Structure formats: C-alpha cells, structure tokens
C-alpha cells in the first residue's frame, strides 16, 4: 500500500540515503531532513561564535582614514568627457590626473 501520493515519483525510501523510509509528505527521510537542519544550526552557531568573540583592545587594528589625494598642479580640463559626453565637472584623482565626476573616466 502506498505511503502517500509521492510514492509514484520517489518510491517508498529516501532517495538521498536509500536506507530509511521517507517521511510522510516529504521527499527525504527523517534523518536526511534533520541533517540539513542540524548543519544550518551548527553553521549559524559557529558564525555567531566568530562574530561575538571578545578581542582585546591591544589586538584590535584601528583603521586609519585614507589620506586625501595630493593637490593637482595641472588645470582642470574644460572640455566635455569623451567617454560619457557629460560636462558636469571634473574631480582630482591624483597628482595631475582628473576624472569625470559622472562616469569616473580619467582625462
């Protein structure tokens, strides 16, 4: 006698392990269903242990802000951007290098 309507597609045993009967109305057996749940719980617990682990202030690395780009000596370009044809302005990237304020293309 069939267990449920899924017997005609999957059979009466778990297709993953083929050792235990399927859970009623499920594709997998009870142990296979529990294995994925246990894996997710263990993974979440491991991530939480790493995230909330105490780190002493001596071991912490304090991020320093990136230094501002050096001032440019070349004048700002006056033409439109050859990449996007915008004329909204230029931004100083590095010494002597200007970038389009819209697309970031270097002039």
Image (cartoon, rainbow, N blue to C red):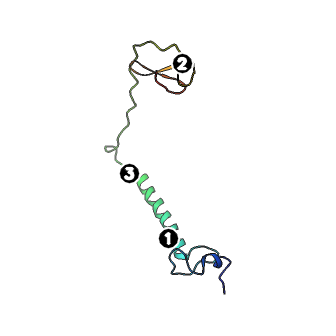
Residue under numbered circle 1? 35
Residue sitting at x 36%, y 49%: 55
Query: Among all residues in the image, which is located at the extreme right?
Result: 5
Q: Quadrant of residue 15?
A: bottom right
Residue 1, given in percent of the width and then of the height, sits at 66, 87
The disc label shown at residue 1, or none: none
**CA separation, marks 3 and 1?**
30 Å
Residue depth check, mark 3 versus mark 1: number of the one nearer the observer: 1
Above or below, 107 against 51 in this view is above
* Location of residue 12 by image quarter: bottom right
**Could you say where residue 107 lies in the image, as x and y percent from the top left?**
46, 20
- Against 21, is 83 above or below? above
Residue ID for mark 2: 89
Mark 2: few/some/many CA within 10 Å (<14, 14-19, 20+): some
Point out the tag, 3 or 2, that comes first from the N-terminus.
Answer: 3
Instruction: Looking at the picture, tell me which residue is in the foreground, 44 or 92.
Output: 92
In the image, residue 98 lies at what x, y percent?
Answer: 45, 20
Residue at the spot of label 3:
54
Would you call the spot at circle 1 few (<14 residues within 10 Å), some (14-19), or many (20 or more)?
few
Between 6 and 49, the one nearer to me in the picture: 6
Q: Rate crowding at label 3 as few (under 14), some (14 to 19) or many (20 or more) other CA atoms within 10 Å.
A: few
CB under 8 Å between callouts 2 and 1? no
Q: Determine contact: label 3, label 1, CB under 8 Å.
A: no
**Residue at 64% in and 79% down:** 7
The front one of 58 and 33 is 33
Nearer the viewer's eye, disc 2 or disc 1?
A: 2
Which element carries disc 2, helix, strand or loop? loop
């Amino acid at each position: 006698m069939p267990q449920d309507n899924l017997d005609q597609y999957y059979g009466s045993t778990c297709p993953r392990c083929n050792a235990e009967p399927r859970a009623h109305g499920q594709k997998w057996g009870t142990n296979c269903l529990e294995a994925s749940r246990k894996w997710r719980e263990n993974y979440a617990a491991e991530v939480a242990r790493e995230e909330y682990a105490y780190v002493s202030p001596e071991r912490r690395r304090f991020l320093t802000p990136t230094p501002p780009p050096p001032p440019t000596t070349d004048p700002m370009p006056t033409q439109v951007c050859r990449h996007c044809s915008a004329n909204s302005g230029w931004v100083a990237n590095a010494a002597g290098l200007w970038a389009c304020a819209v697309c970031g293309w270097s002039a």
